[in-house]
Image (cartoon, grey):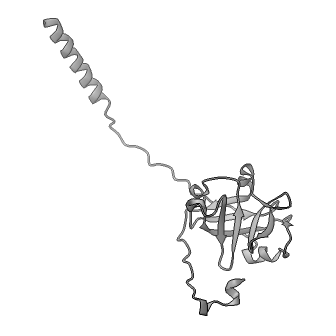
Amino acid sequence: MNKLNKIIAGFFILSGITFFGSCVKGDFDAPVIIVPHVDFSSNTTIPQLIAMHTAGGLESITTDVIVQGVVVANDSTGNFYKQIIIQDDNAGLQIQIEQKLLYNTYKLGQRVFIKCKGLALGEYGGNMQLGYIVNGAIGRIPADSIKNHIFLENFPETIPAPIKLTIPTLSASYLN
């Protein structure tokens, strides 16, 4: 019995040393927050880019065109599969991207810069799209090429508020 008491006491002593020795005492370094930043600026607005398009055609962009915009729609709700929608002060543009779960990277309100050289501009269902030419139509930017074309700037900003319209106030400028 005496030997059993010694074993139990030894167990409790070792358990106590382990328990109290495992407490961390000290300060931790603050986490490093890396803010996405680009070292270039846009040289074209979205309406200027759209003006490069001819109805019914596909235009390969061969010049150093850079546009910027704010993400106003992504694939978080499942309504925009493998695409994001960006807008600047005057127009919007669909960006076709061969990647799922885009909402994790391209959050609503996120400012993005797009280097358009090597991409193509086209139209589908009356909406302007930016992507690659695949089988004679606008396709998605391949996952391994995204880093060459789409760049994040800062953290997401305020999401642009939608404009509420009624049928009587609708004009041709909103339809175009």
Left or right of 9 in this view: 136: right
Query: Is 5 placed above or below 80 here?
Result: above
Q: Position of residue 52 (x, y in %)?
A: 83, 74
* Residue 155 occupies quadrant: bottom right
| 136 or 71: nearer the viewer | 136
* Residue 39 occupies quadrant: bottom right
| 30 or 123: nearer the viewer | 123
Q: Position of residue 120 (x, y in %)?
A: 81, 64
Query: Is 122 placed above or below 99 here?
Result: below
Q: Position of residue 174 (x, y in %)?
A: 67, 85
Name the residue furthest bottom.
168
| 107 or 113: nearer the viewer | 107
Left or right of 98 in this view: 159: left
* Residue 23 occupies quadrant: top left
Name the residue: 68% across, 69% down.
68
Name the residue: 24% across, 25% down.
16
- Quadrant placement of the N terminus: top left
- Quadrant placement of the C terminus: bottom right
Q: Position of residue 152 (x, y in %)?
A: 63, 60
Total numbered badges shown on the rendered structure: 0
Can you see residue 45? no
Can you see residue 120? yes
| 86 or 11: nearer the viewer | 86
Name the residue: 17% across, 6% down.
3
